[in-house]
Image (cartoon, helix red, strand yellow):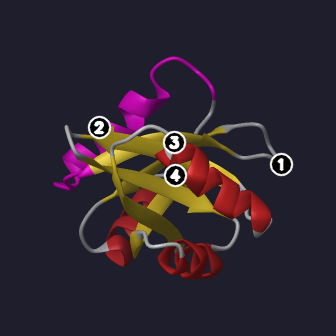
Amino acid sequence: MLKQVSIYAENKKGTMQDITAILQKKEINILGSVTNDSAEYGIIRMVVSNPEETIDALTESGYVCKLTSVIAVEVEDEVGNLNHLLTALHDSNINVNYIYLSFNRESGKPIMVFHTEDICEVEECIAARGFTVL
């Protein structure tokens, strides 16, 4: 099961650079990320090389963080493959709360990272439909 770090951060100049500087100092690699913002605060979701150390480092620096389980599914880099994945989820009555893109550095293939309820059950369902769950 893949762990994602959610960072609740003030939406101001330099915040993202501050976060990435903290991770660089700890030699933590960002493998995938998405940012959702509002007028004052945003949520930065990241899959990183060391989620626990990321939480510790960012919390020490005053950020509010949360560790969340997510699913990563490798897909072929072809037109329609995201739709195939979403159709399989829809047909299985699975709601996707959010989704973002990363890449498998070994295979070079896209990875769709998504959050849903009951991660273990959804992983089994997706794997049974022929998708590669990482």
> How many neighbours does mark 4 have within 10 angstroms: few (below 14), some (14-19), or many (20 or more)?
few
Q: Which residue is mark 4?
A: 130
Q: Are marks 3 and 4 in contact (CB under 8 Å)?
A: no
Classify residue 84 by image quadrant: top left
Was residue 86 drawn as part of the magenta stretch in this picture? yes
Q: Which residue is mark 3?
A: 14
Q: Are marks 1 and 3 in contact (CB under 8 Å)?
A: no
Residue 113 rendering spot, x and y as whole percentages: 47, 51
Residue 134: tell me if it is visible: no
Q: Of the two numbered discs 2 and 4 on the same chain, state the one appearing first in sequence.
A: 2
> How many neighbours does mark 2 have within 10 angstroms: few (below 14), some (14-19), or many (20 or more)?
few
The structure residue drawn at horizontal position 40% and vertical position 42%, both measured from the top left corner, is: 35
Q: Nearer the viewer, residue 45 or 19?
A: 19
Give the CA separation, mark 1 to mark 3: 32 Å
Give the CA separation, mark 3 to mark 4: 42 Å
Amino acid type, mark 4: Gly
Give the CA separation, mark 2 to mark 4: 13 Å
Quick one: SS at disc 1? loop
Q: Tell me the quadrant of the picture where the C terminus can be found.
A: bottom right
Quick one: SS at disc 4? loop
Q: Are marks 1 and 2 in contact (CB under 8 Å)?
A: no
Image disc number at residue 106: 1
Q: Which residue is mark 2?
A: 87
Amino acid type, mark 2: Thr
Residue 130: tell me if it is visible: yes
Image disc number at residue 121: none
Q: Which of the two discs, 3 and 4, sits closer to the camera?
A: 3
Amino acid type, mark 1: Glu
Q: Which of the two discs, 1 and 2, sits closer to the camera?
A: 1
Q: Of the two numbered discs 1 and 4 on the same chain, state the one appearing first in sequence.
A: 1
Q: Of the two numbered discs 1 and 2 on the same chain, state the one appearing first in sequence.
A: 2
Q: Nearer the viewer, residue 9 or 4?
A: 9
